[in-house]
Image (cartoon, coloured by chain):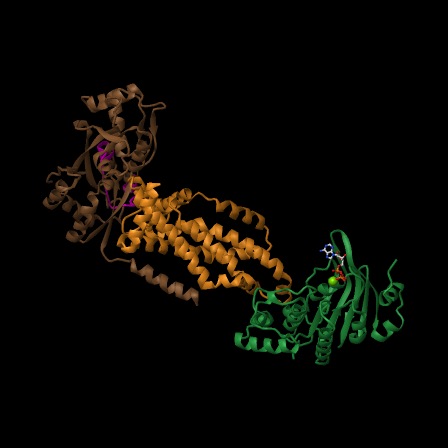
Amino acid sequence: MNDIVEGLWQAARLVVTLDSDLAEITLRSLQVTVTATAIASAIGLPLGAWIAVNRFRLRRAVIIMLNALMGLPPVVVGLIVYVILSRSGPLGVFGLLFTPTAMIVAQTIIITPIIASISHQAIRELWADYHDLLISLHATRRQRIATLLWDGRRALMTAALAGFGRAIGEVGAIMIVGGNIDHATRVLTTAIALETGKGDFGLALALGFVLIALAIAVNLALHMLSGTERGSRW
Amino acid sequence: MMFKTALAAFSALWLATAAGAEELKMAVTTSFANSGLAEVLLPEIQADTGIEVQLLVVGTGQALKLGEAGDVDAVLVHAKAAEEAFVAAGNATHRREIMYNDFIIVGPSADAAGAGGAGSASEAFAKIAGTQAPFVSRGDDSGTHKAELAIWKSAGVEPAGDWYRAVGQGMGAALNTAAGMDAYIFADRASWLNFANKAGLALVFEGDPALFNQYAYLPVNPEKHAHVKGDAAKALEEWLVSEKAKGLIEGYQINGQQLFHFNAEAM
Amino acid sequence: MVSPILPLMLEDVELLRGGRRILGPITLTVGGAGITVVMGPNGAGKTSLLRAMHGLERVSRGWVLWQGEAEDVRARQAFVFQTPVLMRRSVIDCIAYPLILDGRPRREARKAAEKQAEAVGLGVTLSAPASVLSGGERQKMALARALVRSPEVLFLDEPCANLDLHSTAEIERILIAARDDGTRIVMSTHNIGQARRLADDILFLFDGRLIEAGANAAFFAGPGTPEARAHINGDLLP
Ligand SMILES: Nc1ncnc2c1ncn2[C@@H]1O[C@H](COP(=O)(O)OP(=O)(O)OP(=O)(O)O)[C@@H](O)[C@H]1O
Ligand SMILES: [Mg+2]
């Protein structure tokens, strides 16, 4: 209990004094996770919509795969990305291991199935509503997907936020592929792991509270930007 | 529109992190990183040589693996036999001893096993094993773990059983576990002094030369991995063995205690 | 004007669903101009027939042949569904949507949609979400959306089912105007009076089969089958 109070207090102090290390790792957390979420959304949202709209032979298999991949253990993803990006691995020449890019790759792999799966679910319902109209209006395949993505944007934003939430709090994979290098790849979650390791629970908790606040702030900001609060009428 | 704003904000953020200094990646052990010495040395290294040293804090086993794969430019660890094998295999050009610190035995302040009264580290271990007092081991193939195993060996004890808990984690996590269980643990002095969550633990045994812990610097062989920054690694080595480094290393203290002893020799 | 898509010919069309024949075999031609009204009791197959004509239902046997074999022949038709499809958009954007698909600039599409909404008597705030519309307003919205592309053939499945008398009269006026403009209309209705007022031709379906087809006057003057007679007299069928 003492630790929690101390953690809250320390978090407040770090934020109020605009601690430069804290600002740096917080920004990096955002940078890595926002990029990963953007890439994963760019892949996952259309993929989910495409699977919802098209009938093809392996459709069921793909859906089952996606659902299974949602539970992908981050450490395993981290390990695989590590082995691939290592200098002695197949993509070693790019020298990406222990860079923010490697962390983005790992997080993208972890959250793309989540985003695709949730968006597939949402788009499938919308497609059931829109099917006859879109066929009747002779919308092209592309137009159908674009329409579904646009009209389903609220549900899709939820999908993207679910991905963001998973990624921002993820530590296993980015610890492995990022290496938690100070001033290079250290982010909030790996810093928390580090401080916990040092037994500095107060600071670890403080960082934890900053992480939670950050997640809430991003959610709030997006909802406000997109006006969801006004939008219960849809 | 919103997307564009986000994109612009994002790319600004992205570019802000691209720095100019020459970067050198060095794998070091947890015990070294936890000592806090790096925070003193790295800014000086950057100021003097222009090299931004990026530390990968891992166990000795993984540190050597990183060097072998060419994922880092240099390695700073403390496991002599493994280091020599590493050089023999052509993974590093050579091995350069820099400094040493020491290991200690930490345990419940009541010290029911009486390890504090032992004459040597192996005797202390034998006493702990004799009373089957809980003992937390790193169990992660790290240099500290290897040193611990060596002492068990010289004590003639095969550590196993309910009382011996191998946690497979870093020094800090292992210390947390020991604090939670009120157990004995083999630790490096620096990690112990920096450790904040001491709970009911205390230093129970120290000073046996068998506990000395030699750190050596291994520049990764550029002939094996062409991308390795051999020149920067050389410059770093020269700095590490310099008089200035000696002053900083010997002068580094935690709670009034000196941690490291500089012992690099001219080549 | 591009080549016409009419006449539409159905040859031995059958729809089998769930092991049951729900329509056919039907052979008929829809050509020329005017309004064809499809009648028949609930479950007779009116919706299925209209959907098959429009290409929304794959036929199990036979052929649905449009004169123009062009790929986009369906885009030159429009369909007003029995239950209007609401998009999660504003009323104006729902109506403008077909024009947006055609690649028309948004501003222009909205302008046309506004006009069309006025033409069908949709007197609501057009910027409101479509989901706030009442049942009758939804049908008017769907009609406006169907008309906004100026289709050559317009299918309507019970377009006045939820409308009051005033709105029904308004819609009938619009349909007559559309017909006079050359739009070929095929619609279903349960409203006998409406069929009398609007139809040039009648198709009478019973249990999936087309049991009568003829001009309005002839059909109402003396339906040839007992089922049709009973239907227009409002008798309960055996
Ligand atoms: N996909 C389907 N599978 C099984 N049966 C179907 C299917 N589609 C339609 N039917 C059946 O076919 C019959 C005709 O349906 P349809 O909707 O065409 O009737 P309708 O004449 O439009 O009736 P209503 O006046 O009630 O609208 C009904 O009995 C219906 O249950
Ligand atoms: Mg019907």
Q: Is residue A73 left or right of residue C212?
A: left
The C terminus of chain C lies in which quarter of the figure? bottom right
Residue C206 locus on image (x, y percent):
82, 61
Foreground of the two, A149 or C90: C90
Can see residue A179? no
| Image point (44%, 43%), residue name | A73
Quarter holding ligand 1: bottom right
The hue used for chain A is orange
Q: Is residue A133 left or right of residue B1?
A: right
Can see residue C34? yes
- Give the residues drawn in magenta, as a range: B65-84
* Residue C177 sits above or below residue B36 on the image: below
* Residue B126 sits above or below residue C152 on the image: above
| Image point (67%, 70%), residue name | C78
Query: Where, by quadrant of the figure, is residue C189 drawn?
Result: bottom right
Foreground of the two, A232 or C37: A232
The N terminus of chain C lies in which quarter of the figure? bottom right
Foreground of the two, C82 or C167: C167
Foreground of the two, C77 or C96: C96
Residue B81 within the segment the image draws in magenta: yes
Residue C158 within the segment the image draws in magenta: no
Query: Where, by quadrant of the figure, is residue B33 drawn?
Result: top left
Residue C86 locus on image (x, y percent):
62, 65
Residue C194 locus on image (x, y percent):
78, 72
| Image point (30%, 48%), residue name | A10
Which chain is the one coloured brown? B
* Residue C196 sits above or below residue C230 on the image: below
The hue used for chain C is green
Q: Is residue B198 left or right of residue B11?
A: left
How many numbered marks are there?
0
Residue C49 locus on image (x, y percent):
75, 63
